[in-house]
Image (cartoon, rainbow, N blue to C red):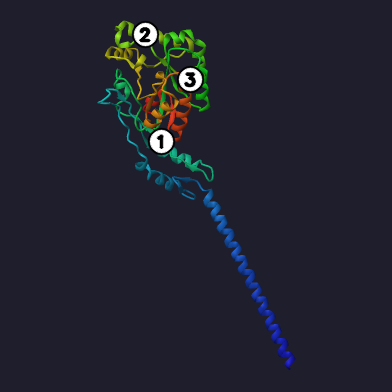
Amino acid sequence: MSISFHSFGLKKMSILSVIILILVVIAFLLIANFNDDSTQQKNISEDRVKFMERDLGQKEVTEIIEIVKEYESKLYQKPQDTYLDPVSKGVIPGLAGKELDVDTTVSKILNAEQGEHVEPEYNKIPPEKTIEDYPAAPIYQGNPEKKEAAFICNVAWGTEYIDSMLKVLKDHQVEISFFLEGRWANNNQDEVIEIYADGHELENHAYSHYLMSEIDRKTIREEITQTNEVIEEIVEEKPKLFGPPAGDFDDDVLEEASKLDMRTILWSLDTVDWTEPGVNYMVDKIVDNIHPGALILIHPTEDTIKAVDQIITELNEKGYEIVTVSELISEY
């Protein structure tokens, strides 16, 4: 009888062990399945399309449209009109505004790849007043909200430093504006072609390097026209900007340039490289005084090339983009 009870107890324990084992296995499977589901959910979340850091996965089109529309006012930027600086009497270029293009942005979202972060698309809003409203006013700088700067390289003598200057600019992958004296361009056509072939802007620095305020209107017009003709003959593109030699001008110069559909360009920062102040002086002068929309005057000299190399590096570190003068003074 005792043996029977013992056998029954063992049998009962054996059944209990099996039940426990089954429960352990079930629990393990549930945990494993939960982990798989969590991982899968995480991967799904990571693979979903995002806009402005918002997950748009499994959203209906109408929901996506409403989400995008929520950012219309936040992303709107009012256009800035061009105006005359009361101190310099120069024109300060305006800046186009922008508004969110809801339709194009939604279309991008709907056609985006899994995991893609979609950037908003914008429509530009032109300012009401542009530089065209002030055709005879000089320009000393670009819009002060543009984190950009442009070099004005006036060329009127020598060719020995042109190649070195172009190499530095190519190394930095930047394009600048060369204002060429007409005589120099006529006598150094290979260099003109080389500058143009590297993607730089060719502009007008008069023909004979006269002080423009000291000559009559007829001669002013001839100085500008003759240089335009020389440059256009060489590269088949007519200059649109005029940089008066030594920055010398008066109302007659401004008006004659305007009649020829030319903008008169000056500068806001000067390396004074023609005085040979040294590389460090030029670098410090420009970098310490840099401002958004700066127009920086240089010439092709040995020290200037070294200075420009450092200036570009330091301006890039400050978040500035180097552009051509035409780009800088554009409202866009």
Quadrant of the rendering where the C terminus is positioned: top left
The correct choice, above or below, for 267 with respect to 315 in the image is: above
Q: Is mark 2 on a helix, strand or loop?
A: helix
Question: Mark 2, mark 3: which one is toward the viewer?
Answer: 3
Mark 2 to mark 3 CA distance (whole Å): 28 Å
Label 2 is placed on what type of residue?
Answer: Glu
Toward which corner of the image does residue 329 lie, by quadrant?
top left
- Say which of 109 and 298 sits in front: 298
Looking at the rendered structure, the number of numbered marks drawn on it comes to 3
Residue holding disc 1: 122
Which type of secondary structure does the marked residue at label 1 adopt? strand
Q: Name the residue under label 3.
A: 302
Upstream in sequence: badge 3 or badge 1:
1
Q: Name the residue under label 2.
A: 223
Q: Quadrant of residue 126?
A: top left
Using the numbered discs, state the Cα–Cα distance from disc 3 to disc 1 in whole angstroms: 44 Å
Q: Position of residue 85 (x, y in %)?
A: 27, 26
User: Mark 3: which amino acid?
Assistant: Glu
Viewer-closest of 251 and 11: 251
Of labels 3 and 1, the one closer to you: 3
Q: Which residue is drawn at 45% across and 14% down?
A: 237
In the image: residue 244, left or right of residue 197 = left
